[in-house]
Image (cartoon, grey):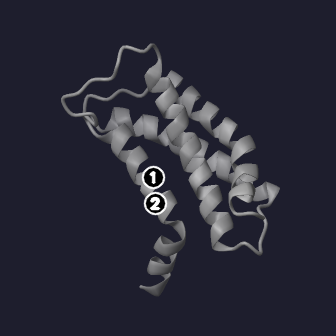
Amino acid sequence: MNKISDFIRHYWPSVLTLSVVLYATLCSDPLGDSSMPPIPHLDKLIHAVMMGGLYGAIVFDRQRSDRSRPLTRRFIYLLAAAVIAFGALDEVAQVAMGLGRSGDLYDFAADCSGVAVAFFTAPPAVRKVLKM
């Protein structure tokens, strides 16, 4: 039990972000009765922000939990691959669950774009925020 509480204590922003992403992408009607404003491709921007935010939250938590150990290239590359794989599985799950959601190749492309932006911006931003 101690390991679980330590994990949650160190990685709660990542867990919270992952929970929001899963709710927003896998719930049959995450907005309820309200609808999205008629802004073209707003959903793609939301996908990019969600996956980039997930990447950034994990980078932040990893660096915050152990400031003495710098982020390695291997970690940031593997994390990018893992979040991209998660985005792909999320799109597949939307189709497989049969809740009226559809997997979309353009949503996945937006997920990848969000990860790409976060790949370059999150590590230096986290170092600056944590004053490292």
Image quadrant where residue 114 sits: top right
Closer to us: 129 or 83: 129
Residue 84 occupies quadrant: top right
State the residue position of label 1: 18
| Percent position of residue 97, x then y | 30, 39
The three-letter code of the residue at mark 2 reads: Val
Residue 101 x/y as whole percent: 31, 29
Rendering coords of residue 74 (x, y %): 78, 57
Q: Give whichever of 46, 77 is nearer the camera.
A: 46
At 44% across and 25% down in the image, what residue appears?
Answer: 43
Left or right: 90 with respect to 64?
A: left
Q: Is residue 126 above or below residue 118?
A: below
**Residue, x 45% and y 52% (percent of image)?**
18
Image coordinates for residue 58, horizontal then vertical, percent = 59, 57
Would you place residue 65 above or below residue 46 in this image?
Answer: below
Front residue of 56/87: it is: 56
Camera sees residue 93: yes
71 on left or right of 24: right
Q: Secondary structure at mark 2?
A: helix
Residue at position x 55%, y 45% in the image: 53
Mark 2 surroundings: few (<14), some (14-19) or many (≥20) residues within 10 A: some
| Residue 49 falls left or right of residue 67 | left
**Res 117 label:** none
Residue 15: give its label: 2
Say whether marks 1 and 2 touch (CB < 8 Å). yes
Q: Secondary structure at mark 1?
A: helix
Badge 1: residue crowd in 10 Å (few <14, some 14–19, many ≥20): some
